[in-house]
Image (spheres, helix red, strand yellow):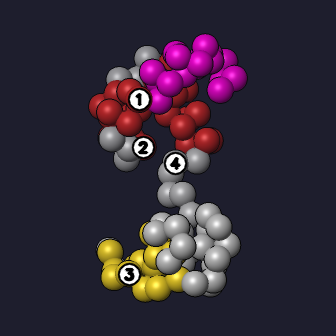
Amino acid sequence: MQCPKCRATHIRKNGKKKGKQNHICVEWSRQFIDHYDPHRGYSDEFKRECLRMYANQSGFRAIERVKGVHHTTVITWVKQVGETGGCIATGCL
């Protein structure tokens, strides 16, 4: 095993957190775990579907009921599209 920052092999175990073994680089005192889980977010297609529903006059809570995603998450997606200048109605996200 190597330190992800400096690639040093002199590392030690440094306790556990949430069931995962922590390690520490002796040289840099940097703490890390041996493997990271992949990102568990919503797919882009799922986001597009929710945003299309919003563009077609569905309310946030209606989207929450149909799609099973929290309404504040959909609000965040709408804000992100507005900040980037994307267009919801045509699906060019």
Secondary element type, mark 1? helix
Q: CA distance from mark 4 to mark 1?
A: 13 Å
- Tell me whether the residue at label 2 lies in contact with that at label 3, contact meaning CB atoms closer than 8 angstroms: no
The kind of residue tagged 1 is: Thr
Q: Earlier in the sequence, mark 4 or mark 3?
A: 3
Q: Earlier in the sequence, mark 1 or mark 2?
A: 2
Q: Earlier in the sequence, mark 1 or mark 3?
A: 3
Tell whether position 6 is magenta.
no
* Mark carried by residue 76: 1
Up the image or down, 45 lies above or below 9; here it is above
Residue 34 rendering spot, x and y as whole percentages = 54, 78
Q: Residue at x 60, y 73 (%)?
A: 3
Q: Is residue 12 visible?
A: yes
Up the image or down, 37 lies above or below 11; here it is above
Residue matched to label 2: 67
**Which of 9/46 is in front?**
9
**Neighbour tally class for label 1: few under 14, some 14-19, many 20 plus, Cα within 10 Å:** few
Secondary element type, mark 2? helix
